[in-house]
């Protein structure tokens, strides 16, 4: 969990897939720092499990990730960016999501400990 990159450079939006190269003009295409931090098979497997939790509860993957961060004790605000108005609206929608204890537990179980 990183308040400066709560969507892991887009990994937690679901737009990337393991085994597929990221598209041009994405954070993962030209910035090796994001790939070094997040691009691993284990992270993609966790994203797929989180996607299932999100879909089972009527959320987008990004809503789940941001809502989980917003509900963390001591977290005042995740800092996210958006390239389009649609992305901004989707990210802001997470403020209206209240996760259940089961959803929070699923996120916690899939979140690696902070370095």
Image: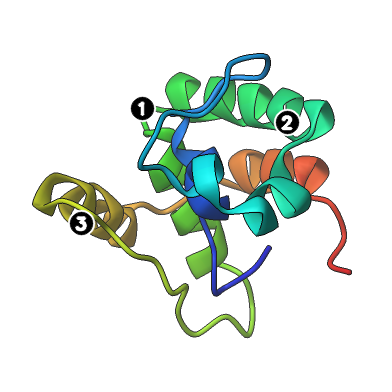
Report the residue marked by disc 1. 58
Report the residue marked by disc 3. 88
Report the residue marked by disc 2. 46
- Is the C terminus in the top left, top right, bottom left or bottom right quadrant? bottom right
Residue at x 33% of width, y 54% of height: 94
Residue 49 as seen in the image, left or right of residue 28:
right
Residue 88 as seen in the image, left or right of residue 36:
left
**Element under disc 1:** loop
Q: Using the numbered discs, state the Cα–Cα distance from disc 3 to disc 1 in whole angstroms.
A: 19 Å
**Element under disc 2:** helix
Relative image position of residue 93 (x, y in whole percent) = 24, 53
User: Which one is in front, 96 or 66?
Assistant: 66
Q: Which residue lies furthest to the left in this view?
A: 85
> Which callout, 2 or 3, points at the residue further toward the start of the chain?
2
Q: Quadrant of residue 105?
A: top right
**How many residues crowd around disc 1 within 10 Å: few (fewer than 14), some, or many (20 or more)?**
few
Residue 16 as seen in the image, left or right of residue 102:
left
């Amino acid at each position: 969990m990183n308040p400066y990159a709560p969507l892991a450079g887009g990994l937690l939006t679901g737009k990337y897939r393991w085994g597929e190269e990221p598209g041009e003009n994405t954070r993962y295409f030209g910035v090796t720092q994001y790939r070094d931090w997040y691009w691993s098979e284990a992270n993609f497997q966790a994203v797929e499990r989180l996607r299932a939790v999100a879909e089972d509860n009527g959320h987008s993957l990004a809503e789940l990730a941001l809502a989980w961060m917003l509900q963390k004790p001591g977290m005042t605000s995740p800092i996210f960016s958006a390239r389009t108005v649609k992305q901004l609206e989707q990210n802001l929608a997470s403020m209206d999501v209240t996760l259940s204890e089961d959803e929070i537990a699923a996120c916690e179980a899939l979140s690696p400990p902070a370095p």
